[in-house]
Amino acid sequence: MTKKFVLLPLSLVAIEAQATVYMTPEQAQSIMFPGETLRPSFRTLDAGQIQAIRKASGVSPLSRQLKAWRASSGGWLIIDEVIGKHEFITYAVALSSTGVLKSMEILDYRESYGGQVRDPRWRAQFVGKRAGNPLRSGSEIKTISGATLSSTHVTDGVRRLLATYAIVLAGG
Amino acid sequence: MTRFVALFAATSLSCATPALASEASLKAEIAALKAQLAVQAEQLARLEAATKALAQSQADTSSKVAAIPTGLPTEAALAPVESAAATPATTIGGYGEISYNNYLKNSSRNEADLKRFVLFFGHRFNERLSFNSEVEIEHAIASADDPGEVEVEQAYLSYAFNPAFNVKAGLFLMPFGFINRSHEPPTFFGVERNEVETRIIPSTYREGGIGIFGTTSFGLSYDAGITTGFNIAKFDDAGNPLGGSHQELVLAKASNLSVYGSLEYRPAPGLLIGGAIFAGNATQKNADFKADTSLPDFSGIQSRVTLWDVHARWQPGRFDFQGLYARGSINNAAALNGVITAYNTDNGANRPLLPSAFYGWLAQGAYVLPLGNDVTLAPFVRYEKFNTQSRLSAGVVADLANRDKVLTTGLSFKPIPDVVIKADYQKFFTNSENDRLNFGIGYQF
């Protein structure tokens, strides 16, 4: 047992480490906006916008950098991160030109457990939501048993991004 | 540079010798060196200028490229998506709970306790390899004069090949029921952990070994492996058959290893069904007696311990329903009890006798009432039944204290999702002297 315990990690370190990425941003773009052209439209949130987002969604942005792309159809792609239980979850939302959520994808999930947020049936609950809609884990969005923190934090993140769209991107 | 210093040293040494003729040649050499240095300085300046020009043209190119509207974002545009850089390599988390029990029939049993103070330490070595651990202090103080305990409840390495296939090695939690894996106070109802997931599934149940686990995108999770097992010689409580005999990786006897496996399926959001099984020989080749012959001699007896459970959870809207059934068995309990009975008679000892089987089940319903923002109030009710001596070998008498039907009802108030204030009332139908009110606070971060 001791031998195995020591040898296992050593032999594994030899394997080249790669990101446990389910989807690169490029793949997310082609899945969420097939055949469309996307232009980076990155923003840096100012203090007023951060406060407005916090007031509207109840959640503060983790980063001042808003990673958004404008699709040729007028829709938006936003890539964002939330903390799961202890580690970051990278996810993307696709919004229509009027800010309705078309799809949500998990790009990168690092925790050993709680990866059920990737389940397409769970993610489908977000489709059709827009800024101002009630969107809470445990009521509109079902909490995942055994992955309470991950599912709650992703739900909070999507609610924050919908508010961010309304406050920052809706003007164009 | 080094040469120059060496030369200088040699010069100062040679100065000590009265050789004036060498001074002229030295001066000439220094002049030559100075000229060489000047040439090199000029070369350096030219190189620097070239580098600056290159960097400028690179910056121009990338800004031009960034402005080109293409379907594929440029490297520069994607640069901020660097979760790896943003992820801390070491993570710290924790949870804790403080409880107060008020016994309705005998207030001398009232008790307040800092039940658990727990810290999680995790470290990510790279994208695939990580370490997880959980250190727990129970009952506030662990010392020679205090009943507290310091425990490492988890310490394992985990390697991710992909989401559906991971390998872990070390000390980790067994995938049974609900509470064994998520026992942070905000995640369960009631101040006290339920009886079934304490007495039938020993809490907190962990073993050392190797396992594989994963989650598919269609909602199926699995966890299976080979680990240390139970040690029957350590059996010490008929009311909690596996509580004393699970080894917790404390110099665990490992001549008999066990296997475990679990499957959980989430057919739709808010619905979970799952089950787990653990089985292995638990006499450990009579290791305890071989180390200390004053203990009972179980030589020649084989005994397999098996534990299994099925559990389900359904969360329609704001409701939360849970159900669980768990059952364990100890093979050859009659032969083992024969040894223990003889031992008790010979030594005037009082070692408890083993049950052949034990089981428990529970049904629980809760309603999570949102009170604005993230504040929630959740009333719940739970009914459970357990019997730690449901099947006994001939001549063993059951103790009524080891079976009961318990009704628990109370409230969980959460000012934020990670903090909980709890209050509940528990009615014990068989052992009504245990009826009590419980109050508690808990947190996780």
Image (cartoon, coloured by chain):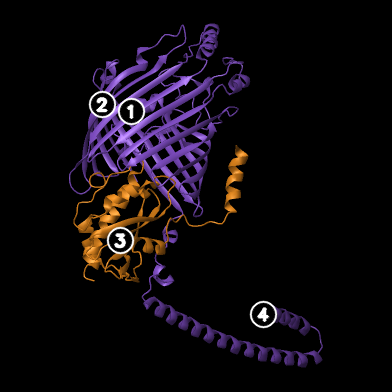
Picture residue at 54% right of the left edge, 12% below the top: B335
Q: Nearer the viewer, mark 1 or mark 4?
A: 1
Q: Which chain is purple?
A: B
> Which one is nearer the viewer's eye here, A143 or B399?
A143
Distance, label 4 to label 3, CA atoms, is: 61 Å
Helix or strand or loop: what does disc 2 sit on?
strand
Question: Which amino acid lies under the numbered mark 2 shown in the image of this protein?
Answer: Thr
Q: Chain of mark 1?
A: B
Residue B174 in view (yes/no): no
Q: Which chain is orange?
A: A
Distance, label 2 to label 1, CA atoms, is: 9 Å
Distance, label 3 to label 1, CA atoms, is: 43 Å
Q: Which residue is mark 3?
A: A94
**Disc sitting over residue B194 in the figure:** 1
Q: Which residue is mark 2?
A: B408
Helix or strand or loop: what does disc 4 sit on?
loop
Q: Position of residue B212 (x, y in %)?
A: 50, 41
Q: Which residue is mark 4?
A: B1
Q: Quadrant of residue B271?
A: top left
Helix or strand or loop: what does disc 3 sit on?
strand
Question: Which amino acid lies under the numbered mark 1 shown in the image of this protein?
Answer: Asn
Q: Chain of mark 2?
A: B
